[in-house]
């Protein structure tokens, strides 16, 4: 239908609040935006099962699904079990091969079993030991956007990020990556839209770029 309102579901990054999308404004006559939020994982829950539970929160057929960072990994997993109008992956990876070297080493060493995720569960305590104002301000930024500080979730999310086994990029996904992303440094390669000056948090800092370009990407026929 020509006047159809397109439902758009937005998935934030690991442990983040959907308020990272506060500045994403799409034309209301063409799009209706819905925010997805992280859930606590069930005991020994697989990534596939978690993705299927998240799908239950989507109330529309054939929506646009956009995910950021680990949320971008999750929406790719969700796309394997549902029909989408568009799949958009921001500041993330297209396959397990794009994990940075340090994460591949952590995966090999199973370092996720020993990660100090309990520190994130109490950022106020961590801030007391900040080495300088820059680190202190970074912690304040984390607090602003942190939604889930449950150690069980953090342990699970870190493990699933490192162990994600997708071998090839999703053939129909739109991948958007910043050329200054210091977290996932190899994801600009291949079929990818590169945002100049974009960092890992460009969904916040480059919101004007997204507001300008997302409508055409979501309505495109490819």
Image: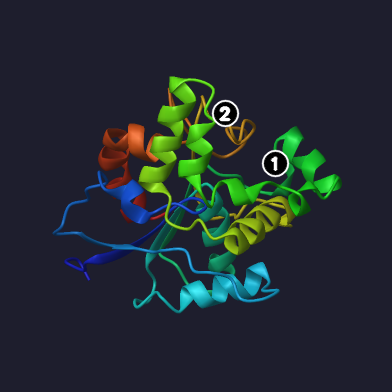
Label 2 secondary element: loop
Residue 159: mark in rendering: none
Say which residue appears at 55% left-offset and 76% top-offset: 52
Is 167 on the left or on the right of 219, as rendered?
A: right
Q: How many residues crowd mark 1 within 10 Å: few (<14), some (14–19), many (20+)?
A: many
Front residue of 156/203: it is 156
Q: Give me the disc on residue 182.
A: 2
SS of the residue under disc 1: loop
Q: Is residue 102 above or below residue 65?
A: above
Q: Position of residue 113 (x, y in %)?
A: 77, 54
Q: Nearer the viewer, residue 118 or 2?
A: 118
Residue 186 position, x and y percent, is 64, 32
Give the image quarter of residue 31.
bottom left
User: Residue drawn 62% across and 33% down?
Assistant: 189
Q: Quadrant of the N terminus?
A: bottom left
Q: Which residue is mark 1?
A: 99
């Amino acid at each position: 239908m020509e006047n159809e309102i397109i439902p758009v579901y937005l998935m934030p990054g690991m442990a983040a609040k959907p308020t990272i999308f506060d500045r994403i404004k799409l034309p209301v006559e063409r799009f209706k935006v819905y925010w997805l939020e992280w859930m606590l994982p069930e005991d020994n829950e697989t990534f596939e099962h978690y993705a299927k539970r998240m799908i239950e929160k989507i109330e529309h057929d054939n929506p646009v699904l956009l995910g950021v960072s680990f949320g971008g990994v999750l929406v790719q997993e969700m796309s394997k079990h549902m029909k989408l109008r568009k799949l958009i992956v921001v500041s993330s990876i297209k396959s397990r091969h794009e994990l940075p070297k340090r994460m591949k080493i952590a995966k090999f060493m199973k370092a996720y079993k020993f990660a100090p995720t309990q520190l994130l569960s109490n950022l106020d305590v961590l801030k007391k030991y900040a080495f300088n104002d820059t680190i202190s301000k970074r912690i304040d930024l984390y607090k602003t956007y942190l939604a889930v500080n449950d150690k069980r979730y953090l342990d699970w999310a870190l493990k699933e990020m490192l162990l994600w086994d997708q071998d090839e990029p999703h053939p129909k996904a739109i991948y958007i990556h910043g050329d200054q992303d210091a977290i996932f440094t190899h994801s600009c390669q291949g079929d990818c839209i590169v945002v100049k000056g974009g960092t890992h948090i460009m969904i916040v800092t480059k919101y004007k770029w997204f507001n300008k370009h997302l409508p055409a990407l979501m309505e495109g026929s490819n």
